[in-house]
Image (tube, rainbow, N blue to C red):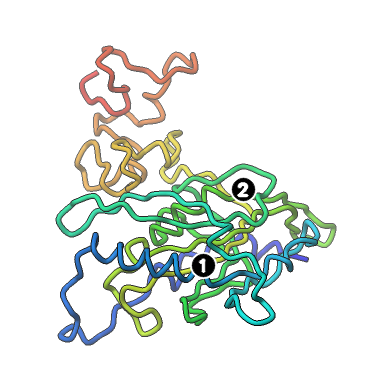
Amino acid sequence: MIKINKSHFLILSISLIFFSCKKDSEEDNVEPPRDMAEQHIVENDSIIEFMQTHFYNYEDFVNLNPNETTEFIIDTIAGDNASKTSLYDQVSTIEIDVKDENDNIIKHNLYYHIIREGSGSNPTIADSIYVSYKGFLFNNKTFDSRKTPVWLEAKNLVKGFKEFIPNLKRGEIIINNDGTYEFKNFGIGFVIMPSGLGYFQNGTTIIPAYSPLIFSVDMMTINVTDHDNDNVLTIDEDVDGDRDFENDDTDSDGFANYRDNDDDGDGVLTKDELDKNNDGVIDDTDGDGVPDYLDPDN
């Protein structure tokens, strides 16, 4: 049973080993970055081989109660486990665009599986998520884990984790008489990613360079974000649609739109330019295809 003290539930966790790991200190011995396209081919082959020869403890998840989870374990298909269903036969695949050092787009395969879908809405890559998780390497070494759920900003996570979480749904929140929260029917799943969606050449003392990563995730609940309270959801502040919220700065004032309550810098707050006549339609006064809140000359 997952029960969280109310005061703990309200704490916003702003750091995580898997998106804030420090680089090794011996910079002089770091090899030049490998070609990303070539590296992905090599890693993708190794990931497929790994998935074909390994399974997860799916039988332990079959009869879980709605408010329960269990430890996610990967093992080799051999001996007494020779008849187990492989990871390869269970995962779904999506392609994720990644820019290399020359701004070339290299498509990376992301492999994931939803064990329990969840019962609520799906988060976006811009939302805050309340999750428990475990991150580990192909040698089964755990490099980070949180059994007690924590709040994370999805947009700040490694790309593979960020792109996976919209596939899980949140659970239900039950408020108990003793002031604790209980989560039911929350989403459970795992993701397997190449290093191009993780840390690539940036190895750490825990994670070697060019390491594919595995994360298991329990999606307790979410908070849909509007970071600057301008009535434009953060997910809608990605003007160019490249899934990077930091490079959208319409008025070039040094503040990305999702942190700027006057996106076009015209002296009128974004929330006051969205829908002045309250007809439910975002205003474009001069009909130039640019909404007023992004148009300083409207």
Q: Quadrant of residue 146?
A: bottom right
Q: Quadrant of residue 284?
A: top left
Above or below — where is 28 with respect to 195?
below
Foreground pick, 48 / 117: 48
Q: Residues within 10 Å of mark 1 (few under 14, many from 20)?
A: some
Above or below — where is 117 with respect to 56?
above
* Amino acid on which the number 2 mark rests in the picture: Lys
Local SS, label 2: loop
Residue 140 horizontal/vertical position (percent): 52, 80
Residue at the location (44% across, 49% down)? 94
Residue at the location (14% across, 56% down)? 102
The total number of labels drawn is 2
Mark 2 or mark 1: which comes first in sequence? 1
* Amino acid on which the number 1 mark rests in the picture: Gln
Residue 211 horizontal/vertical position (percent): 37, 73
Residue 64 horizontal/vertical position (percent): 78, 62
Q: Horizontal placement of 56 versus 44: left or right?
A: right
In what quadrant of the picture does the N terminus appear? bottom right
Q: CA distance from mark 2 to mark 1?
A: 27 Å
Foreground pick, 2 / 211: 211
Question: Which residue in the protein does label 2 denote?
Answer: 169
In what quadrant of the picture does the C terminus appear? top left
Local SS, label 1: helix
Question: Which residue in the protein does label 1 denote?
Answer: 52
Q: Quadrant of residue 253?
A: top left
Q: Horizontal placement of 274 versus 92: left or right?
A: left
Foreground pick, 23 / 46: 46
Above or below — where is 137 with respect to 169?
below
Above or below — where is 226 with respect to 129?
above
Residue 21 horizontal/vertical position (percent): 37, 75
Q: Horizontal placement of 72 versus 233: left or right?
A: right
